[in-house]
Amino acid sequence: MRAKQAMVRGDLAGMLADAERSLALFDGLGDPWGRLEAADALGRHAEITADYERAAALRRAGLRLAEELGMWPEAAFRTAELGRLALLAGDLGRARELHERALRLAEELPSAYAEEFARIGLALVARREGDHGAAEAHLRACLALLRRIGGRTGVAFATAQLGFVAEERGDAAAALALHREALDAARSTGDPRAVALCLEGIAGARALAGHHAHAARLLGTAARMRASTGAPLPPGERGDVDRIAAAARAALGDGGFDAALARGLEP
């Protein structure tokens, strides 16, 4: 639990140290459930730091263990997490297949939490495929649950994703409103990576509205916030930032964009 709390604070070094210590303790006890929990934290760390090979190995091992223990909600989570790794690798077909499998299992149990996690993944797949309607439907279904249970981190992420959907549809005003709402939720979590995502989203809305220097400054601030956690945005997650940066750079020119990026803004 301390490792997962460190993740939310952006303390990735502390997260790794506690997760490895936890795994060693549970190994010593011979406790399979504990190993599953500790390995989950290690898998999250590996994904955040773009060590996808290690993340996949941990997720596959976790899925096998969850199935052996009959812990089917955990099996649904691990299946969706493997789908997330396929998404980051650009294999959208495999990502959709794994998330749909996770969703079916979650619905059969039923497990609302596992269903929400699978739907978030399906929304991300739909966004990358350009299916904005499907992405929005999945995200709004997730938000209904997250708001009932007070899941602030999830609310921030899902609302930000709705903001990106609005931006991709060309609605700058709706995108800005959604990303500002997401930013309020993200700030309440204390997670710098969550705040950075929302700043990147606001940058997209501002660029769409023609405020390219403001967008570049927001991107610069977000990049520094991510770097402060020891986890800059990895290539598999740079699609939105690269798209927004390209629009701002085209409008400002290389010199203007780089200057605004370096200047940044107070978040």
Image (tube, rainbow, N blue to C red):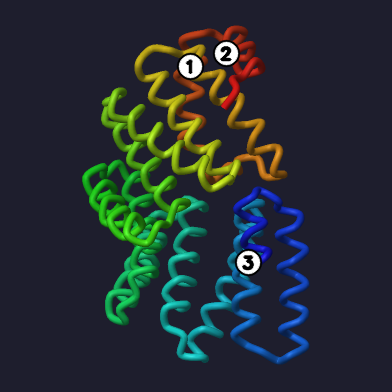
Crowding near the residue tagged with mark 2, few <14, some 14–19, many ≥20 C-alpha atoms within 10 Å: many
Spot occupied by residue 141 in the image (x, y as percentages of width and height):
26, 56
Q: Which residue is mark 3?
A: 41
Q: Which residue is mark 1?
A: 248
Horizontal side, residue 180 vs residue 166: left or right: right
Snapshot quadrant of residue 28 = bottom right
Badge nearest the viewer, 3 or 1? 3
Who comes first in sequence, dot 3 or dot 1?
3
Crowding near the residue tagged with mark 1, few <14, some 14–19, many ≥20 C-alpha atoms within 10 Å: many
Q: Which residue is mark 2?
A: 257
Question: Where is the C terminus found, in terms of image quarters?
Answer: top right
Whether pointer 1 and pointer 2 mark residues with C-beta atoms closer than 8 Å, the reply is yes
Q: Secondary structure at mark 2?
A: helix
Who comes first in sequence, dot 1 or dot 2?
1
Q: Residue at x 34, y 44 (%)?
A: 127
Crowding near the residue tagged with mark 3, few <14, some 14–19, many ≥20 C-alpha atoms within 10 Å: many
Q: Residue at x 38, y 12 (%)?
A: 210
Spot occupied by residue 35 in the image (x, y as percentages of width and height):
65, 81
